[in-house]
Amino acid sequence: MKVLIANRGEIAVRVARTCRAMGLPSVAVYSEADVGALHVREADEAVAIGPAEAVRSYLSIDAILGAARRSGADAIHPGYGFLSQNGDFAEAVAAAGLTFIGPPAAAHRAMGDKKAARRLMAAAGVPVVPGYDGDDQQDARLGAEAARIGWPVMIKPSRGGGGKGMRVVRSAAEFTSALPASRRESQAAFGDDAMVLERFVERPRHVEVQVMADTHGHTLHLLERECSIQRRHQKVVEETPSPALEPGRRAQLLAAGVAAARAVGYVNAGTVEFLLDPQGSFYFLEMNTRLQVEHPVTEAVTGLDLVRLQIDVAAGKPLPIAQEDVVSRGHALECRIYAEDPAKGDLPSPGRVLHLATPQGPGVRFDDGIETGSEVTVFYDPLLAKLITWGRDRAESIERMAAALRRTAVLGVVTNLARLQAIVDHPAFRAGALHTGFLDEHMGAAPAPAAPPPEVAVKAAAAALQLAGRGAGAGPAGAAPDPWASLGAVRLP
Amino acid sequence: MSADVKVERVRDGAFVATVDGRRVPFQCVRDGARVWLHWDGVTYVLEDEEEGGRGAQRGHAHALEAPMPGRVIAVKVAPGQAVVKGEEVLVVEAMKMENALRAPRDGVVKAVSARVGEMVSPGTVLVELE
């Protein structure tokens, strides 16, 4: 099987690595903005698919299928984001005679429309949050439904994912200004502006069940993850097992996840997301019909390679494990490293990675999407890399994470690394007292301005710049050496 | 008392300092007028003295500048309009997210140079206050 990876960044790199481990040839695709990107070189070959704008490259079904044809790929892994949850894409891939490494189009459609998914889950006995999932989408009707549900209300793009276009509103006035912005973001990101409204559950935890199903009728759960540390409805820190679940509740949650997957005849990897309220009740949130960003924590505690399972299932093989073989060992934590500036309200912060230092050590995994020299552009998601640690227990994985974060440096691009350090060092985080408003509650305002560097560090930096300047030869003193500039001066015979 | 520091270069951007007999690996690169330094788990951005002076002025509250490259998707004020601190003045889209830019203080809008649909780069003055 030759696998085309219809994605970019860290997930494209990660999928390419499993292909390599399995001995499968892989094909990367890239836009004009990604010519020099890491994922392009991690695959066996690479095909250009169009301009920087995602709608004309990574989101273009024609461009992706064309690349598959040109490279002779016979399977497509969509990663996450982009076309990964697009039923039309899954269908077009199948129609082109290629294998889609993911669920069938019908599952995408059943779950991709959050309105329909809510109705389906309620019918299957999976609890849902009180809300509005109707087809009448006029502003006035939505406004009336929001008032009926009662403030605060969550506005969610019916076709959405990843937090884009989602907003919590606490009054009719806020609703009126938030709805058009949500619709615009939804239209831009998902090509649709229908909305679902739900009562906003106060101080909930976000817990989710990883499911995996084959084409032979086996549907398994691969335990849960907790992803309560979020900003702008986008996950930042994830872990498994959840510190909030006692065994009885965990068993109910995992069973609900499997029931949800079975209700849509699910095949391949998927995630059923739930809100867990402070009283311990859980409600279906949505199902993500793809591999999740945070899947490595599941891999760390189960010892499974989820991408490998996805590829085997797509090839028609039965799952190599039964439910009783899925055992959690220890605890795993993931931190998402974003190009964004917590001091400026988490605004995206593009730039060039001038130096990247990555941590190693027992129980440490770094899923990289960048390297020294990478350009971080405004065109795509600001996720740069993921840091995952494993430990015998939660305290050990946190300890390893705290140390690994301190050894991670992304110079040239402002990142959330300092914020991640503050999160894992926070007493409430260490105590496992999490909820989705954790960041607002504990680090809401702009972070305290960083203390100036110690004098010895400034001295060392001055000495370092002098050494670097000497090493750069003809370049201006102290400038970071540019390998292309020096190569350009070499005369070839 | 100031510690004695000896620095060796490991490779581009990576160094080891010896401080009072203790070895401290660190990373450091120049970025135009700025210097990025990762020391003891913390990343710092240092500015040259001259540039630092200029940098200090960037916080002046008369102008609202684009904080990052992106596309202006909404302009919510017009010249002559009074705004209060924190009021949403513009929306800039970057990395698929809408980012509201807010008035840095109470005031009256003197000029609006941002146009909807325009791509802007960091530091571009979008709105000026009197």
Image: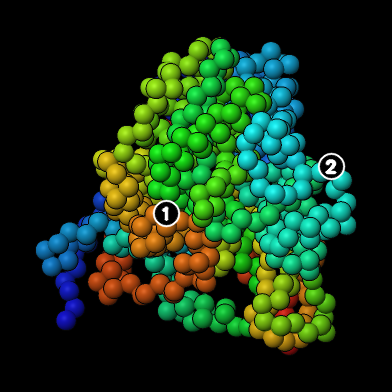
Q: Is residue A116 above or below residue A370?
A: above
To which residue does mark 1 refer? A410
Q: Residue A413: image x %, image y %?
A: 48, 57
User: Which corner quadrant holds the N terminus of chain A?
Assistant: top right
Q: Residue at x 50, y 24 (%)?
A: A220
Whether residue B27 sits left or right of residue B124 in the image: it is left
Q: CA distance from mark 1 to mark 2?
A: 46 Å
Nearer to us of marks 1 and 2 is 2
Using the image, name the chain to which the residue with label 1 belongs: A
The foreground one among A130 and A83 is: A130
Whether residue A308 sits left or right of residue A55 in the image: it is left
Q: Is residue A57 above or below residue B114?
A: above
Residue A312 makes an appearance in the image: yes
Using the image, name the chain to which the residue with label 2 belongs: A
Badge 2: residue crowd in 10 Å (few <14, some 14–19, many ≥20): few
The foreground one among B83 and B95 is: B83
Residue farthest along the left direction in this orientation: B21
Badge 1: residue crowd in 10 Å (few <14, some 14–19, many ≥20): many
* Mark 2: amino acid: Asp
Q: Residue B37: image x %, image y %?
A: 36, 63
Residue A135's tag is 2
Q: Residue at x 35, y 47 (%)?
A: A358
User: Which corner quadrant holds the C terminus of chain A?
Assistant: top left
The foreground one among A169 and A262 is: A262
Of the two numbered discs 1 and 2 on the same chain, state the one appearing first in sequence. 2
Q: Residue A93: image x %, image y %?
A: 69, 21
Structure colour scheme:
rainbow
Q: Residue A209: image x %, image y %?
A: 51, 36
Whether residue A141 sits left or right of residue A85 in the image: it is right
